[in-house]
Structure formats: C-alpha cells, structure tokens
Image (cartoon, rainbow, N blue to C red):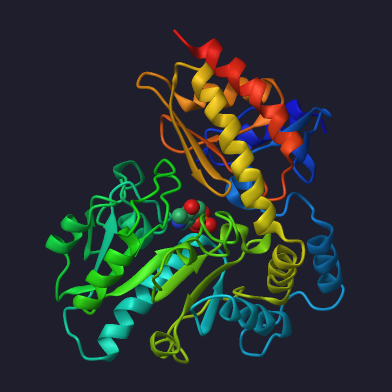
Amino acid sequence: MKSSEIINIGQQHVMGTYARFPLALVKGKGSRVWDADGKEYIDFVAGIATTNLGHCHPAVTEAIKKQAETLLHVSNLYHIEPQVKLAEWLTEHSFAERAFFCNSGAEANEGAIKLARKYHSDKGRIGKYKIIAAGGSFHGRTLATLTATGQDKVKAGFSPLPEGFSHVPYDDLEALEEHIGEDTAAVILEPIQGEGGIRIPSPGYMAGVRDLCDKNGALLILDEIQTGMGRTGKLLAHQWEEMTPDIVTMAKGLGNGVPIGALLTTEEVASSFGPGSHATTFGGNPLCAAAALATVRTLEAEGVMEHCLAVSKYFLKRLEEVKKASPIVKDVRGKGLLIGVELEEGYLAIDAVKKLIEKGFLTVIAGERVHRLVPALNITEEEVDRLIPALEETYSSMHK
Ligand SMILES: *Cc1c(COP(=O)(O)O)cnc(C)c1O
C-alpha cells in the first residue's frame, strides 16, 4: 500500500485521539525507519523512548520468533518460565524483591496506586489513602492515573475523577513538606519529568522526598516508565541518587516495543498483593516476557548503557553548539539520551518537528516549547552528526 492510501483509511476508521503526522511507517532497522513510499528517516523518537535497542534488534526478534513457535499465552494461573526469569533479572538489578507484570505504563501506575492504598489498609490505617503527585507530571490516561497527572488538559471532560489526589510543585521540597501528612498513602514522582518538558530536579531532591515520606509513613512510588530501561545511562534513573523508593513502575522500553509494563517493590509492600487482590490477563505472558527478557539481557550484554552515556556526552556537546548558533534555543538539557531543547517564548517545538520530518528526521515534543530527542540508546555519533546541521537549519528557518 502507498502512504496516501494507509493515511486515507486511517483518517476514516481509526479514532482521532492523536494529531497524527501524515506519515505511514512500515519498516525499521536500528535507528532507521522507512515509510510506505520507501523514504528513509533517522529516528530520534524511538516510539517515544520505547525501542531503546533500536528497531527489530536481532536478539529481541529471535526471542519473539522462538517464543511464538513454543507458547504464546497460557494464564497467570500457572508459572511461566520467561516471566519468572524476567522477575529474577529485574529484582537482581534493582532495590526490589518482587515484580508484578501488566501491559502498559498507565496500568503499572494504576497498580502502584492500588498497592499503596491496600498496604496501608492492611495495616489498619483508616483514612491513609491520599496520593500526592507533582505539577507538570504525566502518569497515564486511566481515570486514576490521569487524576494523578499534573496537567489539566488530560482531565477536561472526564469528571467526576477519583478522590484523594493532590499536587505540589515539582522540585520543591518545602511545598511537599507543607502538604504531606498522616493521611498521605504515597507520593508518586518521575525522577525526571518526561512529558512535562524533560525537567531534571535539583541534586538532593529525591533523597529529600524519600526523607519526607519516611517521616510521614508514606510510600514513595517512582514512575520510571520513561526514565527507566537504561534511558539515563543506568537501568533506573533513581540509581544515580543515594535513595531507594518503595515502588517503581516501568513500561515503555521494557519490551523494546512489545507491550509490557511492570511494578517492582519490596517483599514487605508486595505482601499486600496476595491472591485475588490484583490481576490482568496478559500481564507477563510468555510472548511479552520473552521479548522483555531478551531486551534486558541485551541491555547488559551489549554494554548499551555505557554506549548511551558516551553518545549522550557527544550529543549534548553538539547541541550546545546548536544553541550558540540558534537565537531561538533557550536551554539544552538531558541525562543519558533523555534530552530536551527548550525554545524561547513564542516558538513551538511542533514546528521544528514538522520541518525535520521533511528533512528525514523523526523528533517529538515534550510540552509546547520543548523539543524532545529520545533516540535508541545504541544510536551512533554518525547518526547524531546527521541531525545537527538539520537542527541548525530548522531553528534558523523558524527565527522571526
Ligand atoms: C508514557 C508514560 C506513561 C504512560 O504509559 P502508557 O504505556 O502510555 O500507559 C506514564 N508515565 C510516564 C512517565 C510516561 O512517560
């Protein structure tokens, strides 16, 4: 099929929940993708920080093929070999002792919120159910997670929203200290805000939040859906800090494109999710778990996180050059390959995204004025070199 035919059918029959670009992608390899008319693009989106090993990584493809020939799905009524191995790998590489698998980021956060409330309820702490989140955060689109999200635009029209959620400014310990209390069940935070504009908190913020949670007997949930899976150069972004959360949620990069989410926690907190308390049909099924297991093993075996840090250093240096040459660039920031270029007031990142598509590059926004660059973690310096002049040209053509 030609791109125009695919787009035409989509516009008639797929719900219009996305303002889609007029682009139909049909093939990918590493950091390259091709549209249905054969045009090649270099991909700095990676399915929004999801295909962290690049498109169709052979180890993941092989695992999917093999599993598809063996067993696709049974049920969590039974023990599942790739699922138990994945849980073992994730707990060996994190603070956690137990994992629960689901299908998406929103579902992982939904599970984390339920778990926090159940944990306090099991301890007889009546009324300790409130969840504090941060302004500008993004936690998903289910009713509970959109309520936790600190952006009004995702909530409009969906009232009544579940009770017990409130927000404090991000990266503001004083505001949290004033707000947190005996009725707080949990604080939920992103270690770096993704959708909110690649906002990196001040050093010590996360440890300070941990401290406030401890003083108030509240659990700390870290939403690592975007920051996890090596994106910042460590498996989980909070591993850069000297603190541990009670619950971590993951999704995006976990299956390198195969839908799988996870909730990681300690033995003690996990004990509140006993038989019958929480479930999902597909969570950690043989196919998704096999893909995720191949993904995490490859992350380690191929030194992907080390590579990510090296390319990050180079990329950020080159972006500083772009900033010097482009009056419309206000700030360049990032950790690992979670990078944002903030544009000056009056400039929209979406305009840069559109112009770059024409030049053969995929990029994405993070809020109105932040141009987000989240390529596969094994992208090369040569591919970064291809983007830089195109970025400079784009920003210079936008300057008014
Ligand atoms: C993408 C994202 C989510 C939602 O994940 P879905 O799989 O789309 O439900 C939640 N939190 C963060 C930080 C995300 O980046």
152 is higher (above) or lower (below) than 59: above
* Location of residue 111 in the rendering, given as x and y in whole percent from the top left corner: 43, 72
Place residue 388 in its image quadrant.
Answer: top right
* Location of residue 308 in the rendering, given as x and y in whole percent from the top left corner: 65, 51
Q: Residue at x 37, y 69 (%)?
A: 221
Residue 23 in view: no
Instruction: Name the quadrant of the C terminus.
Output: top left
Instruction: Name the quadrant of the N terminus.
Output: top right
> Which residue is nearer to you in this view: 184 or 334?
334
> Which residue is nearer to you in this view: 66 or 352?
352
> Which residue is nearer to you in this view: 266 or 287?
266
* Location of residue 191 in the rendering, given as x and y in whole percent from the top left corner: 41, 58
Q: Is residue 347 left or right of residue 90?
A: left
202 is higher (above) or lower (below) than 299: above
Q: Residue at x 72, y 80 (%)?
A: 82
Give the total number of marks visible in the rendering. Answer: 0
Place residue 342 in its image quadrant.
Answer: top left
Q: Is residue 128 left or right of residue 22?
A: left
61 is higher (above) or lower (below) than 135: below
Q: Residue at x 42, y 91 (%)?
A: 271
* Location of residue 368 in the rendering, given as x and y in whole percent from the top left corner: 41, 31
Residue 264 in view: yes
Q: Residue furthest top?
A: 400
